[in-house]
Image: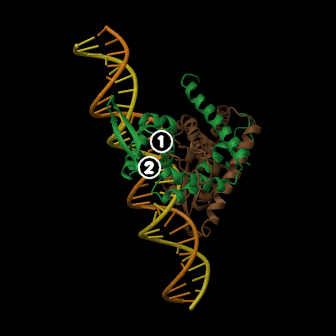
Chain colours: A green, B brown, C yellow, D orange
Amino acid sequence: MTTKAAKSEDALPDEALALGQQLCFAVYSATHAFNRAYKPLLDRFGLTYPQYLVLLALWQQDGMTVKRIGVELGLDSGTLSPLLKRLEAAGYVGRMRDPADERQVIVSLTENGRRLKTEAFKILAEIGRATGCGLEEVGELRDALHRLTQRLADRQVEGLEAD
Amino acid sequence: MTTKAAKSEDALPDEALALGQQLCFAVYSATHAFNRAYKPLLDRFGLTYPQYLVLLALWQQDGMTVKRIGVELGLDSGTLSPLLKRLEAAGYVGRMRDPADERQVIVSLTENGRRLKTEAFKILAEIGRATGCGLEEVGELRDALHRLTQRLADRQVEGLEAD
DNA sequence: CAAAATTAAATTGCACGCAAATTAATTTTG
DNA sequence: CAAAATTAATTTGCGTGCAATTTAATTTTG
């Protein structure tokens, strides 16, 4: 025990830094686990998980702008532009400039994209089984994560002026 | 309501597909929120979040092989090799072939890398504040996520033979 | 109303994350 | 013990994510 770091800092024990103790790592790992679980289900349709998220958003509200989709998913145009181009190439969505405001691009489901919605319910059920959680447990965990995300995001906004 | 998809499939209502209802999306969003929260804290050291995870692992157990780090973090060598090369270039770790088994590469903290551990306690405290959760709440959420991750991973392994 | 500021997408550059192929070393086995 | 199989890293290729820049269109202002 030659390294007795941070003893006077916060009285945090060494184990506080252990990976298994970190909430952020638990979230990080769960994200990857979900990605791996979705992959074989989405591969059949040539979709990636983020592309699937875009379709989820469009199934709820078709004809959104790139900007709006970005707000829904928390992604910027730097991520969405090439992703949407691939979704278009795959034949699931179409893109066209809004005649009323040529800056905006409206993304709409194609017939194929709409058809896929039926399959999504099966994917949803499959993933639901894989999580092995009851509906109530899923709901609680989901809400707790939403609250956590919100608090982290709030900090970001405040932090622009604070120390 | 022209699209009445999946009515007979699982009796799942349309809202079941809403982004806000998805546990996977809640996890996905939380991961990004953590990334954004860590970014300004890690930028000062020229570190990315995954690089920071590697350091967390090495602070617990120095001198691990690439393979072993991959097991701890759930990453493969395709991700770790270039990441470790950057950590080495930044002066936080050194890499050398294991003389006893030349296939393996042992990753060790440099003096600089060890020194950074002290800062990590401050980062940890800062993030802890940003989450705005009590220790108990963090612990419960973390454990629930670990259980979820485990169940998803189990499915992956089984799924190799099952339908 | 024209110049300046703002906004929406797209583009560029960099770092994951993963699959697949490659290389080199070790272990298994015939 | 030599050939075959296995293992550990690296490399390559592709799709995110995000910061920063660019381009084009719209809104604000002087």
Image location of residue A64, percent across then percent down: 44, 36
- Label 2 residue SS: helix
Q: Amino acid at mark 2?
A: Gly
Badge 2 density bin: few <14, some 14–19, many ≥20, Cα 10 Å = some
- Label 1 residue SS: helix
Task: Quadrant for residue B134, please give it.
Answer: top right
Q: Looking at the image, which is closer to me, B51 or A47?
A: A47
Give the residue pinned by disc 1.
Answer: A58
Is residue B103 among what the camera can see?
Answer: yes
- Does residue A59 appear left or right of residue A81 in this picture? right
Q: Chain of mark 2?
A: A
CB contact under 8 Å: marks 1 and 2 = yes
Give the residue pinned by disc 2.
Answer: A113
Image location of residue B37, percent across then percent down: 58, 35
Q: Residue furthest front?
A: B2
Q: Residue furthest right?
A: B136
Residue at x 47%, y 42% (from the top left corner)? A58
Q: Amino acid at mark 1?
A: Leu
Task: Quadrant for residue B130, please give it.
Answer: top right
Residue at x 56%, y 30% (from the top left corner)? A156
Q: Earlier in the sequence, mark 1 or mark 2?
A: 1
Image location of residue A106, percent across then percent down: 38, 37
Residue at x 55%, y 27% (from the top left corner)? A157
Q: Quadrant of the C terminus of chain B?
A: bottom right
Q: Chain of mark 1?
A: A
